[in-house]
Amino acid sequence: MPRTVHVLNGPNLNLLGTREPQVYGAQTLADVQQLCERACERHGLRLVFQQSNHEGALVDAIHEAGREHAAGQLAGVVLNAGAYTHTSVALLDAIKGTGVPLIELHISNVFAREAFRHRSWISPAARAVICGLGVAGYALAIDAIAAW
Ligand code: DHK
């Protein structure tokens, strides 16, 4: 049975393609899903791809990944928590509480942007952080997870 990669996207990422394209690019979330599917296929991994604008739903999705982790079925999690990156102790606690191996991802270079985006509550619990590579970062994150 192939191991699973969870790619979780937080608030406003459903607007990719039309949202501030100069910052986030022209590709849609459906394009990102396709790119992740291809990367997972290359590595023989199963993809679970989700987006939610709700913090609790993202916590639930991390718990779901945590159950797979406990069962030895999880390859890893890619989390673009959107703005919750900069605010959510609940997401930090979910990652710590489940122990899921996770890559924090940002499409934009958050360090070249407003100061409030420089602080991440998630980074202390992440194995790695990818930021500023555009949506290509998602495929690179899956490549890295496949190599763990
Ligand atoms: C996405 C968001 O929605 C922002 O709130 C973050 C991140 C940056 C990104 O670059 O993917 O600050």
Image (cartoon, grey):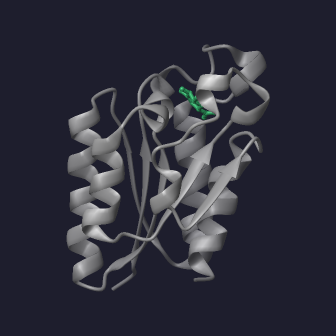
Q: Is residue 79 left or right of residue 110?
A: left
Q: Is residue 25 left or right of residue 83?
A: right
Q: Position of residue 58 (x, y in %)?
A: 29, 43
Q: Residue at x 29, y 54 (%)?
A: 93
In the rendered image, the quadrant that contains the N terminus is bottom left
Q: Position of residue 75 (x, y in %)?
A: 44, 76
Q: Quadrant of residue 72?
A: bottom left
Q: Is residue 38 left or right of residue 125?
A: right
Q: Is residue 125 above or below residue 33?
A: below
Q: Quadrant of residue 144?
A: bottom right
How many numbered discs?
Answer: 0
Q: Is residue 107 above or below residue 54?
A: below
Q: Is residue 26 visible?
A: no
In the rendered image, the quadrant that contains the C terminus is bottom right
Q: Quadrant of ligand 1?
A: top right
Q: Residue at x 67, y 13 (%)?
A: 20
Q: Residue at x 59, y 24 (%)?
A: 116
The residue nearer to you, when weighing 82 against 1, is: 82
Q: Is residue 51 visible?
A: yes
Q: Is residue 38 left or right of residue 101?
A: right
Q: Is residue 141 above or below residue 110?
A: below
Q: Position of residue 112 (x, y in %)?
A: 79, 29
Q: Position of residue 6 (x, y in %)?
A: 40, 59
Q: Residue at x 55, y 53 (%)?
A: 104
